[in-house]
Image (cartoon, grey):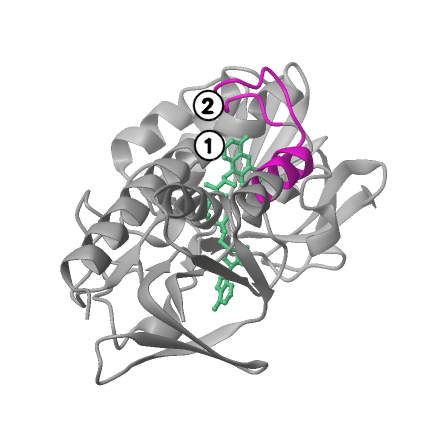
Amino acid sequence: MTDILIVGGGPAGLTAAIYGLRANKSVTVIEKDAFGGQITHSPKVENIPGFEEITGIEFAERLVDQALAQGAEMEAAEVTGIRANEDGTFTAITEEGEIDGRAVILATGARHRLLGLPDEEAFVGQGLSFCAVCDGAYYRDRDVAVIGGGNSAMQEALLLADLCHKVTVVQNLAFLTGEEKLAAQLRSRPNVEILYSTLAAKYLGSPTDGITGLVVRSESGEERTIPADGVFVAVGLEPQNAPFADWIALDARGYADSDEGCTTVTPGIFVAGDCRSKRIRQVTTAAADGAVAALAACDWIDTNKK
Ligand SMILES: Cc1cc2nc3c(=O)[nH]c(=O)nc-3n(C[C@H](O)[C@H](O)[C@H](O)COP(=O)(O)OP(=O)(O)OC[C@H]3O[C@@H](n4cnc5c(N)ncnc54)[C@H](O)[C@@H]3O)c2cc1C
């Protein structure tokens, strides 16, 4: 039996592992995809304290190595559910088998919704981004497109308008759906063009050399190519909390409700990182949650020792 079961091996889960291990607890991290999480998609990260510049993959590798060096057990499997046992412990259920633990930290992150266009997954980090704060500077004085018309898309577009030569906003509806104040700001920018009732149809370029343009389709079916060295997709995030909905309270958008202590409605189950209801989703905030959740899990184990 491991002390702390961590579901998700991104920055939140791996930081939780490091903190748990340093508090002398045994830790098992279960990851269904790539250890390191979403940041592995970023070719260049420049806002992690202590690293002027690092690739997402190198950062992830360092985090994994650090957790392993402290003694973390790593399991590659998808957790499909959690069971609470009569003795107060928990079991993570995976197709490969079951793993028991005294406390659980859910650090399952969130996935950016994609549009379903050809080669889309392969373009992520190769011209296709979800984060203007993270990647906008790479497109200084260049042309970009933003897909979406809600608050997030408008905020991304405004930030990019400060840096880029031209920003084309591609919105499927005949109007912007976010706050009017943001919409007015966007409309007033001379280097922003908003295409209404228009769908993104195809990324031009290649996943190895990056995006060179975007084909869009109007309501009448007419296609045209817009110049874009980068495309920022802002059509929503999808937290990966569904398998755990019986144990944690979810907000209207599916994020885990919790306070700054990373606790949930189930004593012994904690949440950390992008899967949690909060405003800023970044590596630093995920790591902060990981530390808080791990120390809360250690306290919980120590006070509920059987
Ligand atoms: C392209 C891109 C660029 C970015 N650039 C930056 C940047 O420059 N700076 C910055 O600070 N942030 C950046 N971010 C955001 C940053 O990556 C996230 O905020 C951070 O990774 C969140 O960490 P996390 O551990 O909470 O979640 P994640 O990184 O999403 O990790 C969660 C992990 O849990 C796993 N998982 C989910 N469900 C299960 C399950 N049921 N069983 C097992 N495993 C499961 C997932 O596979 C995933 O690996 C970027 C994100 C992207 C996509």
Quick one: quadrant of the C terminus?
Answer: bottom left
- Residue 149 in sight: no
Q: Residue at x 19, y 45 (%)?
A: 261
Bin the neighbour count of mark 1 within 10 Å (Cα to Cα): few under 14, some 14-19, many 20 and up.
Answer: many
Crowding at mark 2 (Cα within 10 Å: few <14, some 14-19, many 20+): some
Q: Position of residue 243 (x, y in %)?
A: 39, 75
Residue visible at 60% across and 52% down?
35
* Number of dots carrying numbers: 2
- In the rendered image, residue 62, in percent from the top left (x then y), is placed at 62, 35
- In the image, residue 157 sits, relative to residue 82, either above or below, namely above
The quadrant of the picture occupied by the N terminus is: bottom left
Indicate the position of residue 81 as horizontal and vertical percent values: 40, 78
41 left or right of 293?
right
| Tag 1 secondary structure | helix
For label 2, the SS is: helix
Side (left or right) of 230 relative to 78: right
The magenta span reads 45-64
Q: CA distance from mark 1 to mark 2?
A: 5 Å
Query: Which numbered marker is on residue 156?
Result: 1
Q: Which residue is mark 2?
A: 159
- Within 8 Å of ligand 1, the CB of disc 2? no
Q: Is residue 54 magenta?
A: yes
Residue 56: image location, x then y, percent? 63, 35
Q: Which mark is residue 185?
A: none
Q: Name the residue rendered at 61%, 22% in the picture.
A: 166
Residues under numbered marks 1 and 2 in contact, where contact means CB atoms less than 8 Å apart:
yes
Looking at the image, can residue 180 be seen?
A: yes
Residue found 51% across the figure and 48% down from its top: 10
Is 189 magenta? The answer is no
Which residue is more in the foreground, 179 or 294?
A: 294
